[in-house]
Amino acid sequence: RQWMVNGSGVRDVFFASPEEGWALTDQGAYINRTVDGGRSWFSEPRIFEQDVSLAKLAGADADHVWAVGGGAIFFRVKD
């Protein structure tokens, strides 16, 4: 099962663990996420004031993930 838009180009992938990871694609204002090692993916909307094309993903662990692109850094910190 894959909820990402079929045929979308993947720009970058980051896995914080063997099961949990994120992927940036060319399609829409979404960051794609898996919690089952890539067997299925779902899209999380990027809710930012600017329309920025993200290029790279990284993180310290699953609770601290960031993406960069368009001269900005966006991050997800889980409380």
Image (tube, rainbow, N blue to C red):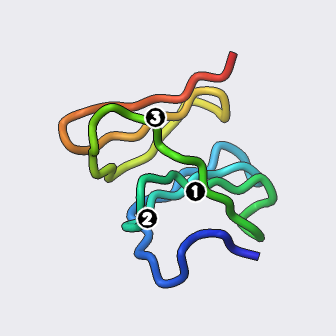
Cα distance between the residues tagged 2 and 3 = 15 Å
Q: In front of the other: label 2 or label 3?
A: 2
Tell me: residue 14, above or below residue 60.
below
Circle 2 crowding by C-alpha within 10 Å: few under 14, some 14–19, many from 20? many
Q: Secondary structure at mark 3?
A: strand
Tell me: residue 31, above or below residue 58.
below
Left or right of 55 in this view: 76: right
Q: Which of the numbered marks, if any, corresponds to residue 25?
A: 2
Q: Secondary structure at mark 2?
A: strand
Left or right of 5 in this view: 56: left
**Residues at discs 2 and 1 in contact (Cβ within 8 Å):** yes
Viewport quadrant of the N terminus: bottom right
Mark 3 = which residue? 66
- x, y (%) of residue 37? 76, 61
**Residues at discs 3 and 1 in contact (Cβ within 8 Å):** no
Disc 2 or 3, which lies upstream in sequence? 2
Left or right of 44 in this view: 10: left
Circle 3 crowding by C-alpha within 10 Å: few under 14, some 14–19, many from 20? some
- x, y (%) of residue 46? 47, 43
- x, y (%) of residue 50? 27, 36
Furthest-left residue in view? 71
- What residue type is disc 2 on? Thr
Disc 2 or 1, which lies upstream in sequence? 2
Residue drawn at point x = 67 percent, y = 35 percent: 62
Cα distance between the residues tagged 2 and 1 = 8 Å
Mark 1 = which residue? 32
- What residue type is disc 1 on? Asn
Cα distance between the residues tagged 3 and 1 = 13 Å
